[in-house]
Amino acid sequence: MIFKGSGRMSTEKSELASVVAKATGLDSTELVTWIEYPPNPNLGDLAFPCFRLAKIQKKSPQQIAEQLAKEISGSNRFAGAEAAGGYVNVRLLRDKVATTTIHLARTATESLFSSQKMKGRVAAVDYSSPNIAKPFGVGHLRSTIIGQSIVRLLKANGCEVVGINHLGDWGTQFGKNIAAYLRWGDEEVVKQNPVRELFHLYVRFHDEAKDNPELEDEGRLWFKRLEEGDPTARRLWQWFIDESIAVFKKTYDLLDVSFDHYLGESFYNDKMEAVVDELRRDNLLVESEGAEVVDLSEWNMPPCIIKKSDGASIYATRDLAAAMYRNQTFGADTLVYVVGAEQTLHFQQIFKVLELMGKPWAKNCKHVSFGMMKYNGERLSTRRGKVVYLDDVLSRAVDEAAKIIESKNPSLSDKESVAKAVGVGAVIFNDLKTYRQHDVDFRYEDVLNFDGETGPYVQYTHARACSVLRKAEGMLGQDPVSFAEVTEIEWRVVSQLMQAAEYFDRAVAEYDPSLIARFALDLCQAFNRFYHDHPILTAEDPSVRQTRLALTDATRAVLNWCLTVLGLTALEAM
RNA sequence: GUCUCAGUAGCUCAGUAGGAUAGAGCAACAGCCUUCUAAGCUGUGGGUCGGGGGUUCGAAUCCCUCCUGAGACGCCA
C-alpha cells in the first residue's frame, strides 16, 4: 500500500511506537501504524493491539500486553498503561499534551496539519471545466468545489499549484450555436442573459432539426467555417466565449473559486500535431479500422484513438497535448484531473499512453473521480433541458439563510453578507462532506437544511468561539497557557486537535477534502459539548479561565483554517 | 456480454492500511435558554453491515460466488 506509513502520525503515537520498538526490537515506523484510538475514551488515549506481536513472538497477546504495559508505565513518558484483552491501553500526560497542542494550534495553525511534504513540487489541477454556452448546473458544482479545495490542500502542503479551467470551447456544437444564433438570435437578448439565451437557442436548434434535417448540415457548415477561420464564425464564437466566461466568473466569485489559467480545448488545436508526430516517432501508432490508435490490449483496455478515420484528431489527442503542455510550460510534475467517474477509462488510457511515451511524470497523474449528480433520481441532461441551475440553488440558499438570521438574530450587523456566506457555505459543505464515488441525488431539502452536519454548523461553532473571545478581550495573550488539569470533556477537544496531521495527510494522499470536513465536524461536536458543559468566561479560578480561553482560541483558529481550506467563510458572528 | 464503481438505521452518510459492544446527522419522540450565540446540547427508539461461502485468534473491511443499482466499453467530451 502506497500510503501506508506515509502519514505523519501524531507525536504521541510516535512516542509510544518508539517505546514499543525498544521493548520488542521491531521498527518503530511500522509499529506506529498499528496504534489505534480506543473506541471508548475511558479505556485510554491510545491503544496498542498485541495480536500481531503474539504471532511473531509466539506468546499470548495478554502476556505481551502485560509486559508492554509495564515497560510503558516505567518509561515515565506516559501517565500510565494497562493491559486489557490483548491490548495495551495507554493514558497520555494530558496536561502536557494539551499545553503543547493548544499552543501550536493557536500560534502556528497550519503546522498543526501540514509538514509541507510537497515542497518543491508543482501540480496542475484541472477542475470545473464547464462548457461554453451551456448552463452551469449543479452537476458542475462537484468538480468546481472539490477541485478548488484540492488546490488549497496541496498549497497548504507546500506544493506549487497551477489551477486550470479546461473550458469546453470547441467542437461541432459551436457550429450549431452559430447557426441557431444567426437564424433566431438577438444580440440584445443574448447580452441580457448570455448563457441561458444561447442555450435556449441551442435547444431550439435541436428540436427543429428533428423535422428539418438540413439544419444539421447548416451546423456542420458553420463549424467547418469556424475551423477555417471564417471571420463571422470566429467573431461569434469568441463572443460566446467572452460572454460565457463573464457569466461563469460571477458564480466563481460567489463561490470564492479562481483559476490561474482559463485554457479551453481550442487552445490545443495547434498543439496536437506535435503529439501525433511524437507518438509516430515512438512507434506507438498503429492503423486500425481506418483510424490511428495506440494499442492497449496488453493492459486490457480498448485502443486509444489518436486520429479518426477521417484524419481529424479527437479528445484523447487533445488531452495528451494538454498534459504535455502542463508539464512543459508550467513545470508540473503532478497532473490532477477533477472529472466525473464516467471518464475513468479515458483517463486510464491517457495515463497509460503517457507512460508508454516515456514520460516519467505519468505515474503522478491522478484522476479524482466522483459520482454523478442526479435530480429526482434522474440523470441531468443539459441537452434535454434537464438542468438545475447552480445560481438558482445558491440564491435560494442565501434567501433561506437570510430568513433564519431574521428570526434568530435580527440585530446582527452586516446581515446581507452573512446570509451570503452562510447560504453559499451550506451548498459547498453539503457537496464536500460526503465526497465519495456515490452518485448523489440533488435535493433542496438537504441543501437548505442548516442543522446538524452542515456548513452553517461549523461556521456557527466558529462564530460562537469568536464571540466568547471577543468578550474576553485582553484576558488572553499569545503566550503558552499551561494546563494543570484537563477535564474529560476538555480532553475530547484536545484529542481531536491532536489528530489534525493524520487527517490532513490522508486528505492530501487521497485528494479527498471530505476528510477535513469530517475533522471539522468532529471538532465542532467536541467543542460544543465543552462549551455547553463548562463555563469559560465565568470560570471561578483565573487559571482555569485562562486554559479554557486558550482551548477556545485553539478551536477558533483550527476551525478557521478548515473552513478556509474547504472554501467557506469563517464568520465572526452570525 | 465484458470491465469499473457502489450496496451499512426510515433517509443521507462515516467507518473499508483486518481489531475491543458497528458510529454520526436528518426525520420522530422526550428534555435543556434569569449564565459566555439554542444554526446548540442531552436522552429514547431504530441494524441478519445486499445474500451465501471461504481465509483468520479476529471480517462491514481481504478472497470467491450470486443478487441489485449506476457508469464505461473505438472514431462525442
Image (spheres, rainbow, N blue to C red):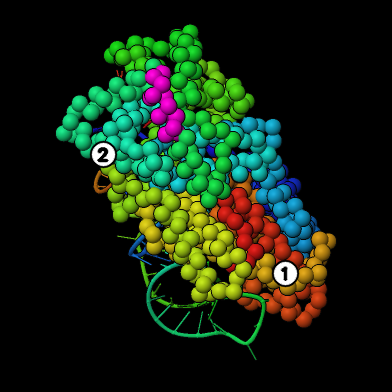
Q: Position of residue B60 (x, y in %)?
A: 42, 53
Question: Which numbered dot is residue A470?
Answer: 1
Figure quadrant of the N terminus of chain A? top right
> Residue extending furthest right?
A479
**Chain ID at mark 2:** A
Foreground mark, 2 or 1, reads 2
Q: Residue at x 49, y 13 (%)?
A: A274
Q: A23 and A390: which one is in front?
A: A390
Q: A490 and A257: which one is in front?
A: A257
**Chain ID at mark 1:** A
Residue A230 is inside the magenta segment: yes
Q: Position of residue A330 (x, y in %)?
A: 61, 26
Instruction: Give the secondary structure at mark 1.
Output: helix
What span is colored magenta in the figure? A229-241
Figure quadrant of the C terminus of chain A? bottom right
Q: Position of residue A132 (x, y in %)?
A: 41, 35
Residue tagged 2: A204
Amino acid at circle 2: Arg
Instruction: Give the secondary structure at mark 2.
Output: helix
Amino acid at circle 1: Arg
Residue A221 is inside the magenta segment: no
- Relative to A366, does residue A481 appear above or below in the rendering? below
